[in-house]
Image (tube, rainbow, N blue to C red):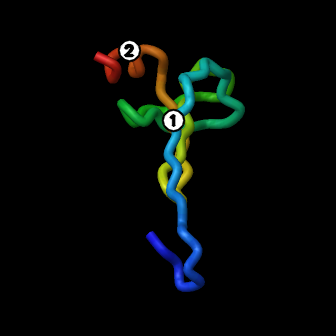
């Protein structure tokens, strides 16, 4: 893709490894849409695609189901 100034725009994508972290605030599980409470262990995955940045949070058991 070329911008108006003739400079080529580069699109980069990445997805991180899952990280098991404690929730610092309430979140919703990406897989089951149930609440992840403060202090609960969650699996966190971050990524970027083009100019979009995203964070996916899941219960560990939901991550296991999603990976099947």
Query: Residue at 54% across / 23% down in the picture?
Result: 18
SS category of the residue bearing label 1: strand
Residue 23 is drawn in which quadrant?
top right
- Please tell me how many numbered marks the rendered image carries: 2
Q: Position of residue 50 (x, y in %)?
A: 49, 56
- Residue that sits furthest to the bottom in the current view: 4
The residue at which mark 1 appears reads as 15
Residue toward you, 63 or 46: 46
Query: Residue at 40% across / 36% down in the picture?
Result: 33
How busy is the neighbourhood of tag 2: few (under 14 within 10 Å), some, or many (20 plus)? few
Q: Position of residue 6 (x, y in %)?
A: 55, 80
Q: Position of residue 25 (x, y in %)?
A: 67, 36
Specify the label residue 51 is tagged with.
Answer: none
Left or right: residue 32 versus residue 51 is: left
* 19 to 48, vertically: above or below: above
Residue toward you, 49 or 25: 49
Left or right: residue 8 versus residue 32 is: right
* 21 to 45, vertically: above or below: above
- C-alpha separation, residue under disc 1 versus residue under disc 2: 17 Å
Residue 22 is drawn in which quadrant?
top right
Residue 21 is drawn in which quadrant?
top right
Nearer the viewer's eye, disc 1 or disc 2? 1
Query: Residue at 56% across / 37% down in the picture?
Result: 46
The residue at which mark 2 appears reads as 64
Left or right: residue 12 versus residue 21 is: left
């Amino acid at each position: 893709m070329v911008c108006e100034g003739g400079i080529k725009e580069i699109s980069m994508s990445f997805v991180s490894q899952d990280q098991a972290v404690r929730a610092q605030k309430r979140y919703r599980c990406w897989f089951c849409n149930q609440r992840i409470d403060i202090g609960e262990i969650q699996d966190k995955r971050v990524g970027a695609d083009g100019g979009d940045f995203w964070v996916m949070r899941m219960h560990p058991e939901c991550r296991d189901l999603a990976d099947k």
